[in-house]
Amino acid sequence: MGTTDQNSKREEEHLIISKPLRLILLRNGNHVLRSLFFIIGFSVGLVFCLQLKAFHMSATKSKQTLWSTLLLFNHSTTMEIKQDQSQTQILQHNMTDQELFTKISSLSSSSSSSWFWRRHNNDEKMVVKVAFMFLTGGGLPLADLWDKFFEGHEGFYSIYVHTNPSFQEHYPETSVFYSRRIPSQAVYWGTSTMVDAERRLLANALLDESNQRFVLLSDSCIPLFNFTTIYDYLTGTNLSYIGSFDDPRTPVYWGTSTMVDAERRLLANALLDESNQRFVLLSDSCIPLFNFTTIYDYLTGTNLSYIGSFDDPRTPGRGRYNPKMYPQINITHWRKGSQWFETTRELALHIIEDTVYYKIFDQYCKPPCYMDEHYIPTFVHMLHGEMSANRSLTWVDWSRAGPHPARFIWPDVTDEFLNRIRFTDKCPYYGLGIRVLGSGLVGSGSVGFGFGSGLVESGSFGS
């Protein structure tokens, strides 16, 4: 019993001692974990700060490198003149555009000659200045670079900024753009407000008669040479630099006669080469469903043209006929078909030579009548029906409702999909069952590909 009591007492003492020991170890363990997490966090933060500093230094160095590259040999002009404070006062006016333009109009061209005469008789101390006019929609992200560009050439330039009236940005007093904002109005791209803003900039710059050259710039422009080079280049000639050229191209708008104009233009240019005997119209979404040899042999092995043409009694067909086309074009002549055609040289010449029916369509076929779907099908049906197979070589999927063929994305374009188009026993063509190679070589989707009722597929392919 004595031994047992003694052992029990020892176990009790052990429990009493070990309990606070465990608490001490647990508390110490928590401190160790916290210290470990702190060290890890501190290390990560230190590395991040070093990387950020390195990135900032790299970016700063890159910017300085850019400046030094662009502004190489950018020495100060020989005649140092302090910036004229009256420039800022000139901009602080409350004139409307009309008042401003009227004031400028009152300054005859003789004022320029008078200024040069006064300059000549004043030992040329009156310096010719170049007006740099910035047309922006907001701020000037490259302001620091321009500040560097103009540095050391005060008195040889003037700055004018036209920006959105609601835009607020404050440049430091050391910047050349400080207080150089003219009374501005909102500008909308592609409208007359763009020209209004340009005229507004010019008019404000013309208020300072020492401005003799005027440069229009955007917020994304940067100088390619230093100030001295550009200044000498501009002031060394009496010529102005205004891009001007005759652009013979005509824009094409979907659903209008400009589509047919573009088709006829393509045909006419292709006809200039007498060796061209077959003509295939394709879109940017068409792809071939067969190899070149197959398509070439198919096209050159027949005297027929492939122009989709059928009588559609529905609203999208006969419903587009305009009675004003009568009597030259009767509703019984009216046909509809795919825009994408293939034609022989002889039929292509007939299409280009037509001046009668083209004018009628151009005058009376307006949306919802779409000339590219009706003009050639109707013209060929009326005058040269025996030359056409009355079907297109472009495969399209019209199973989905809408004004355009089904649109396919890249996951849809598989070997199985293409083979199904190439080797199907029958291809529905306006309600008729037609074998693919028996009906054409081209298919249409919406990246475009295939020969469905033809040899090429076309439609809408997206990514």
Image: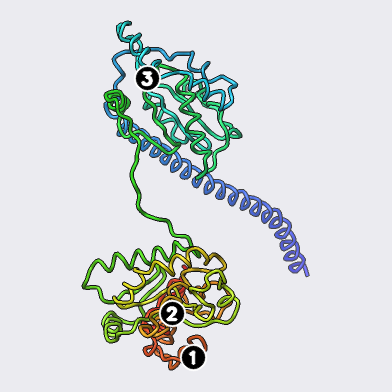
SS at mark 1? strand
| Left or right position of 402 against 147 | right
Q: Earlier in the sequence, mark 3 or mark 1?
A: 3
Q: Residue at x 48, y 41 (%)?
A: 49
The quadrant where residue 384 appears: bottom left
Q: Earlier in the sequence, mark 1 or mark 2?
A: 2
Q: Residues within 10 Å of mark 2 (few under 14, many from 20)?
A: some
SS at mark 2? helix
Regarding residue 318, the answer to whether it shows in the image is yes
Q: Amino acid at mark 1?
A: Leu
- Mark 3, mark 2: which one is toward the viewer? 2
- Mark 3, mark 1: which one is toward the viewer? 1
Instruction: Give residue 316's position: percent from left, percent from top.
Output: 57, 75
Q: Residue at x 59, y 52 (%)?
A: 33
Instruction: Give residue 445's position: percent from left, percent from top.
Output: 46, 75
Q: Amino acid at mark 3?
A: Lys
Dot 3 corresponds to which residue? 129
Q: Nearer the viewer, residue 306 or 177?
A: 306
- Label 1 to label 2, Cα distance in Å? 22 Å
In the rendered view, would you say 452 is above or below 286?
below
- Label 3 to label 1, Cα distance in Å? 77 Å
The quadrant where residue 351 appears: bottom left
Dot 2 corresponds to which residue? 382
Q: Which mark is residue 432?
A: 1
Regarding residue 450, the answer to whether it shows in the image is no
